[in-house]
Amino acid sequence: MTDKRTPARRIVEAFGDCETLAGMYSDDVTWRLNYSLPGNIAGPHRGKTAVTAFNDAVFNKIYNSASLRVDIHDEIGDEASSVVRFDMHAESRRGNAYDVEYVLFAKTRNGLVYEVVELLDTLASTEQHQGNRVGTPPSA
């Protein structure tokens, strides 16, 4: 049975599982977020070692990875280039609830991800890490 999910969706659904994420990357992978974020977060993070270290920092130092879940809203693209819009829900290591809408773009070659661009509401993210429920997506 063929996996019909796009690479962008597979990345998002693996959030928190750093070993699975690492297995998706090419050696020359890059990952970046909004330029308005601090450089250690925004990146770009270049190379598999840097990207996997960034994933580890995010999912094991910023968030409680056991609390993490995503709700996919939209997914378009193919194996070469794809995008997914989703809400990420988690608890921060500070104990604050986190619910922010994201868009993630992924490009692949030879079955491996070589570029990830992750965009989010940076104000909501910053506020929620401080315990303020700013920019929370409406519940269904």
Image (cartoon, rainbow, N blue to C red):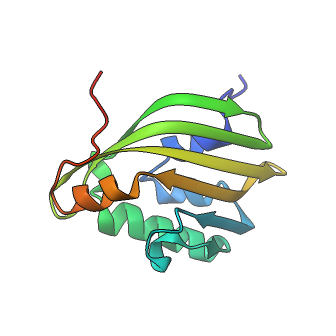
Question: Do we see residue 16 in this rendering?
Answer: yes
Q: Position of residue 107 (x, y in %)?
A: 74, 50
Residue 72 coordinates in the image, percent (x, y): 48, 31
Q: How many marks?
A: 0
Relative placement, left or right, of 59 versus 4 is left
In the image, what residue occupies the spot 47% across and 68% down?
36
- Up the image or down, 60 lies above or below 45; here it is above
Q: Quadrant of residue 139?
A: top left
**69, 102: nearer the viewer:** 102
> Residue 52 at x, y = what percent?
55, 68
Q: Quadrant of the C terminus?
A: top left
Seen from this angle, which residue lies furthest right?
110
Residue at image point 34% right, 65% down:
60
Q: Is residue 130 left or right of residue 104?
A: left
Residue 92 visible, this angle: no
Vertical comparison of 56 with 139: above or below: below
Where is 16 relative to 137, above or below? below
Q: Quadrant of the N terminus?
A: top right
**In the image: residue 4, left or right of residue 108:** left
Instruction: Give the residue displayed 48% in from the left and 64% down from the top.
Output: 55
Q: Quadrant of residue 71?
A: top left
Query: Which image quadrant for residue 37?
Result: bottom left
Q: Residue at x 30, y 62 (%)?
A: 126
Give x and y (percent) for residue 128.
Answer: 23, 55
